[in-house]
C-alpha cells in the first residue's frame, strides 16, 4: 500500500537519499516502539510522556544552544500555531500512543501505526489543500485494509488459542 502511495524509489520520481533516510527512520521507529514499551512498564502513560517530553526539550534546548539556531515566531499567530502543535500533535498524540502501547503491546501498536502516512495525507488534503490523488487514496486504503485483516487474524488466533487451552 505504501509503495502504491509513494511510488518506487527506482522509478526516477523519488530521491534515493530521501527514501534511504525514510527507511532508516522506519528502522529506528521499529526499535523505538518495543523499547518505549519496556521503559514505560508500570508507569502511567501520562507520566511516561511527561518524562519523555522533558528529555526531548532538554535535548532540543542543547541543540539550539550548540547550533545557535533559535528563531522565535513573530506575533500571536506564530505562538498560537506552536501551542496548538505542542498540545495536539505532540502531547495528546504521544499520550494516546503510550496508552495504546500499554493496551495493545508493541507488535499490534507498530502494525496499527502503519496507517499514519495515509491519515497524514488525508489531513494534509483537508487542512492544507494538498491534492489527494487516486494513487494515494488507493495505497492508503490497501494499508488500512491490511492492518484490519492482520488484527482480525490475530484476534481469531488468540481466540482459538484460548479455546484450545480451556
Image (spheres, grey):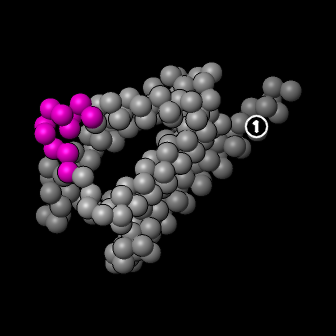
Report the magenta residues as a range. Answer: 61-71
Relative height, residue 134 to residue 145 (above, below): below
> Is disc 1 surrounded by few (<14), some (14 to 19) or many (20+) residues within 10 Å?
few
Residue sitting at x 27%, y 44%: 23
Query: Can you give x and y, in whole percent of width and height, for residue 160 in the image?
Result: 76, 37
- Magenta span: predominant SS is helix
Query: Can you give x and y, in whole percent of width and height, for residue 42 in the image?
Result: 63, 21
58 left or right of 72? right
Q: Nearer the viewer, residue 25 or 46?
A: 46
The quadrant of the image that shows the N terminus is: bottom left
For residue 31, which quarter of the picture? Answer: top left
Q: Nearer the viewer, residue 90 or 120?
A: 90
Q: Is residue 29 visible?
A: yes
Residue sitting at x 20%, y 38%: 64
Query: Can you give x and y, in whole percent of width and height, for residue 89 in the image?
Result: 45, 53
Q: Which residue is mark 1?
A: 160
The quadrant of the image that shows the C terminus is: top right
Residue sitting at x 36%, y 58%: 79
Q: Is residue 31 visible?
A: no
143 left or right of 44? left
Q: Nearer the viewer, residue 49 or 111?
A: 49
38 left or right of 124? right
Amino acid at each position: 500500500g505504501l509503495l502504491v502511495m509513494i511510488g518506487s524509489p527506482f522509478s526516477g520520481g523519488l530521491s534515493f537519499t530521501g527514501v534511504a533516510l525514510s527507511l532508516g527512520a522506519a528502522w529506528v521507529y521499529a526499535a523505538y516502539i518495543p523499547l518505549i514499551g519496556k521503559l514505560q512498564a508500570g508507569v502511567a502513560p501520562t507520566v511516561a510522556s511527561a518524562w519523555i517530553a522533558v528529555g526531548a526539550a532538554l535535548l532540543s534546548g542543547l541543540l539550539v544552544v550548540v547550533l545557535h539556531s533559535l528563531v522565535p515566531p513573530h506575533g500571536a499567530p506564530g505562538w498560537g500555531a506552536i501551542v496548538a502543535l505542542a498540545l495536539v500533535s505532540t502531547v495528546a498524540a504521544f499520550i494516546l500512543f503510550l496508552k495504546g502501547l500499554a493496551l495493545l503491546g508493541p507488535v499490534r501498536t507498530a502494525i496499527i501505526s502503519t496507517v499514519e502516512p495515509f491519515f497524514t495525507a488525508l489531513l494534509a488534503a483537508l487542512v492544507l489543500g494538498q491534492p489527494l490523488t487516486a494513487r494515494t487514496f488507493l495505497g492508503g486504503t490497501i494499508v488500512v485494509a491490511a492492518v484490519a485483516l492482520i488484527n482480525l487474524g490475530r484476534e481469531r488466533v488468540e481466540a482459538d488459542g484460548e479455546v484450545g487451552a480451556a
